[in-house]
Image (cartoon, grey):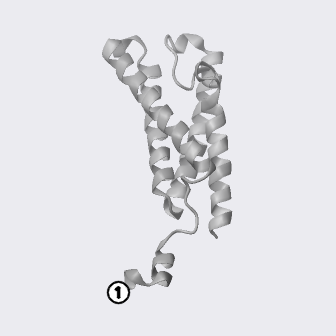
Amino acid sequence: MSDTDRPEVAEARKPSFELGTGPGRVLVWFYGVFTVAAASRTIVEMVRGFDRAPLAYTLSAVAALVYGFITYSLVRGGEKARRAALVCCAAELIGVLVVGAWTLAEPAAFPDSTVWSDFGMGYLFIPVILPVTGMIWLRRARTVAV
């Protein structure tokens, strides 16, 4: 009998909690959709005329990268991925709050909107709800795994 055939070895290799299971699957789905949406929007906007609103388009690209990294971390699982996703969710929330307030305080700085403009109003406020939900899930995942 090899090591991989023994049940106790197989069990020891499995993480005790998968980030992308249960409610985590919904987060993976939302983050995946937002990755595609933000990246697609950014590509189209940059091709059409980056010089029109470079700040807005760059911020949309940053949002796409953050969403993509969080999606990857949730799918990958493990403690390091959980911590990285938690940091990215916090950064995402700060970004949404800063950009949202900035777009309301100084609309002239954004001739075109970003994913995070007006706190994600163009996306039904999901960009402000998603990182909060993600952080709650990731903190819960830590308490279950330990």
Residue 6, picture quadrant: bottom left
Give the residue at x 43% y 15%. Answer: 53
* Quadrant of the drawing holding the N terminus: bottom left
Secondary structure of residue under mark 1: loop
Q: Is residue 24 above or below residue 32?
A: below
Give the residue at x 60% y 44%. Answer: 90
Of all residues, the one furthest to the bottom in this rendering is 1
Q: Crowdedness of circle 1 by 10 Å Cα count: few (<14), some, many (20+)?
A: few
Which amino acid, mark 1?
A: Ser
Q: Position of residue 66 (x, y in %)?
A: 48, 40
Question: Which residue is at the front of the view, 86 or 27?
Answer: 27
Q: Position of residue 72 (x, y in %)?
A: 44, 48
Residue matched to label 1: 2
Give the residue at x 60% y 31%. Answer: 127
Q: Position of residue 68 (x, y in %)?
A: 44, 41
Q: Is residue 10 above or below residue 36?
A: below
Question: Which residue is at the front of the view, 107 or 89?
Answer: 89
Q: Is residue 9 above or below residue 67?
A: below
* Quadrant of the drawing holding the C terminus: bottom right
Question: Which residue is at the front of the view, 6 or 33?
Answer: 6
Question: Which residue is at the front of the view, 2 or 28?
Answer: 2
Give the residue at x 64% y 25%. Answer: 119
Q: Is residue 47 left or right of residue 26?
A: left
Q: Is residue 63 left or right of residue 128?
A: left
